[in-house]
């Protein structure tokens, strides 16, 4: 009954999602407290209390025909206005309601954007390691993913490799900083250079190249780092955002796409993304939660919660002889596998009831991703298993 | 910046959505009370009081990490179980949680289903007149829409035309009863014959043909008609459902796809639809509203509200000399245009501040759709405009 693409997709599966299911099965077998599932980027801090109050207030006071009703495909105008003004206040931008499209999460936003712009065989450049779903999103619309290499010391992009990968077929570049899976933040210097390279490529090929900044982790930064807003480095930059991590709402599927006025063909692009929101079957972002997030823009997730996990995990693993990148943002630790084939390492970890995600899922073998959006207690308890694992692989005597 | 398909899509627009926007502009110009917007299928009865109670109870008592968190791509298992049991109780089916996938509305459900099954050039048969978005949904995945004619007396499908349109490339048939835009319910006799024709075609071509029953209006039936459940007429039938109309939640985007165990390749199909829910960017149906609808399965929308509108509108228009099909379900009236080119008629109606949708939007020229999911008062007030219109077209002296 299935299409060829879908059959293949089922065969390949999603390593992360498969682990999510496997983790649940292991929890049943060994007891939830004895399984250390570091596989999924599910926020561990609860949604802010304010959200609860806003939801209840809306449900009690708003006309249900508005609260649960259709609106423009781009979302409630007043919600978009509020979010635009918040961005302007924080980042000195000049968005208004006509520049934002409310989306069914960042994933929905990326898909409707890619559908809006991609003709078959158009190329979309990504920086390895990258969120593996980008490949599916691009291939949904018959685009071609082009991977560029990282600098293996810093996990900033290798910019000369990036430059060499741009062609006349390059339609878009997806950037994700703070990065999933590495936790690295691309430096202002990196961003300046990316802007310069893209401008030169546009000139060279006589094309427009859209830089799509996928920013679910925008606010999740450590060591006092303030959020950056990438539209200032390159004119043709749009921002895809999700409230999944910042308000701990991953199941609600709520985000937006922001298109600065400076983007080439701004009006058509906004109209195209709204159109694709409709015809791809999203129709609109869920209504009640749209209204609620607009009143929670001042709310912040508890970054200190993740920061404590980050330090405990990073230091604990270093002591055991593992080598990892110190995360600057997001809630992932990117650790070197003791073997070039990290899948072997992942399987060994499973025997110690540790669920890690292989780097090849992110287009970068030889590493694993450890999602530390878990309870601090679990990290402490997991250390015995990591110690056993370290002994087994011989990085700890 | 846009792809060729999207550019074309913007040019063609959606007549219904364009009217939604136009209606808002006209309301500003003439005052909302003087514009009779019959263009959009937005429920006019509020969501049931029970839903409000359930939402507030969930928000107050449920762990926010569960309430707003990720779950399996197919949805919360307990929600699927509850909905499966409700279907079994009502329709004598044997669904369990593994047969249901929670979706971002019926539109999301249709898209992930079509993505799961369609290879390029596969054909999807629809019965004219049909919801115009089906064409977009099929073309999203490079499928080809094949239209079959209606019987112009009854607006039941013309079954010999249907039979002649089935080929070795027919992958699916979409059926929608109670029908948008006609309000007609396909009779058990029609359904039996469709089943027989499909079985014969499968035999003839050595293929499997999936019948997709799009059922947002399942419960909206008049004159005491009980909901039918179409899986009993043909084995390879799946059901796409939405709570948009039955619980008046169109903005929340919540529905499901139900795959009976008898469907060929059941397990792969369920896995494929779940996979496509993920990779097309829906990820999962919104979490809070998933949990809420599961506790509202016994709730019913106020059919008598729409029934009163139906009678007033149908009788009022008949008195003015207009010719329409008496709706048996849904909340649309299908009216013959006095001119073969109904777009001319729609433009004339606009001058009387009446917003109607041209039949060509539904693949059937010469008719207009009047959505009577509006206040009863608006229908009464609109009659003066309809009278003026009738005079202008000469069907009323």
Image: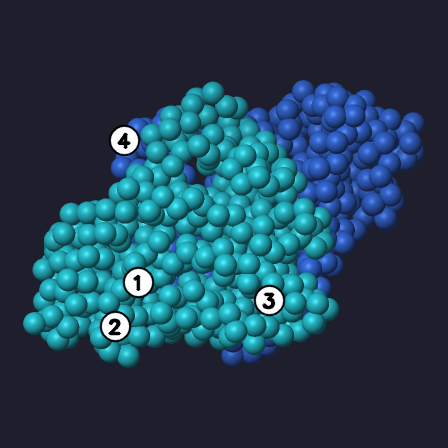
Chain colours: A cyan, B blue
Task: Report the disc number at residue A197.
Answer: 3
Q: Could you tell which of marks 3 and 1 lies nearer the N-terminus?
A: 3
Q: Are marks 3 and 1 in contact (CB under 8 Å)?
A: no
Of badges 2 and 4, nearer the viewer stands: 2
Give the secondary structure at mark 2.
loop
Give the distance between the C-alpha atoms of the residues marked 1 and 4, in whole angstroms. Answer: 39 Å
The chain containing the residue under callout 3 comes to A
Q: Position of residue A250 (x, y in %)?
A: 38, 47
In this orientation, which residue lies closer to the viewer: A17 or B311?
Answer: A17
B2 vs B47, left or right, is right
Residue A325: mark: 1
Circle 3 crowding by C-alpha within 10 Å: few under 14, some 14–19, many from 20? some
Q: Quarter-wise, where is residue B258 in the image?
A: bottom left
Q: Residues within 10 Å of mark 2 (few under 14, many from 20)?
A: many
Dot 4 corresponds to which residue?
Answer: B61
Could you confirm whether marks 2 and 4 are on the same chain?
no
- Do callouts 2 and 3 point to residues on the same chain? yes
The mark found on residue B146 in the picture is none
Tell me residue B263's x, y (percent). Answer: 42, 65
């Amino acid at each position: 009954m299935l299409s060829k693409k879908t059959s293949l997709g089922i065969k390949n599966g999603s390593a992360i999602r498969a682990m999510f299911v496997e983790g649940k099965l292991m929890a049943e077998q060994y007891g939830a407290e004895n399984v250390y599932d570091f596989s999924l980027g599910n926020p561990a801090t609860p949604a802010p209390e304010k959200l609860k109050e806003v939801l209840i207030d809306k449900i009690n006071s708003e006309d249900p025909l508005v609260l649960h009703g259709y609106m423009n495909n781009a979302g409630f105008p007043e919600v978009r206005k509020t979010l635009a003004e918040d961005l302007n206040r924080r980042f000195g931008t000049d968005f208004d309601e006509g520049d934002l499209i409310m989306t069914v999460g960042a994933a929905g936003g990326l898909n409707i954007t890619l559908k809006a712009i991609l003709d078959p065989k158009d190329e979309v450049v990504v920086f390895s390691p990258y969120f593996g779903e980008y490949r599916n999103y691009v291939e949904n619309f018959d685009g071609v993913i082009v991977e560029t290499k990282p600098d293996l010391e810093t996990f900033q992009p290798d910019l000369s490799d990036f430059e060499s990968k741009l062609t006349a077929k390059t339609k878009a570049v997806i950037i994700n900083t703070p990065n999933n899976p590495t936790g690295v933040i691309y430096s202002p210097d990196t961003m300046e250079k990316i802007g310069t390279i893209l401008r030169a490529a546009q000139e060279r090929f006589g094309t427009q190249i859209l830089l799509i900044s996928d920013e679910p982790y925008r606010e999740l930064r450590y060591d006092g780092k303030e959020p950056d807003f990438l539209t200032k480095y390159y004119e043709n930059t749009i921002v895809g955002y999700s409230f999944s991590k910042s308000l701990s709402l991953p199941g609600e599927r709520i985000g937006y796409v922001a298109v600065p006025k400076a983007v080439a063909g701004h009006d058509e692009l906004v109209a195209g993304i709204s159109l694709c929101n409709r015809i791809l079957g999203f129709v609109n972002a869920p209504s009640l939660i749209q209204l609620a997030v607009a009143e929670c823009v001042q709310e912040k997730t508890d970054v200190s919660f993740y920061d404590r996990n980050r330090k405990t995990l990073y230091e604990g693993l270093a002591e055991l002889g593992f080598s990892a990148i110190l995360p600057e943002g997001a809630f992932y630790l990117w650790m070197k596998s003791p073997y070039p084939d990290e899948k072997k390492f992942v399987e060994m970890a499973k025997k110690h009831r540790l669920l890690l995600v292989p780097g090849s899922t992110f287009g970068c073998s030889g590493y694993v991703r450890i999602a530390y959006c878990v309870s601090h207690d679990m990290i402490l308890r997991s250390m015995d298993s990591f110690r056993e694992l370290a002994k087994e692989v011989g990085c700890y005597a």
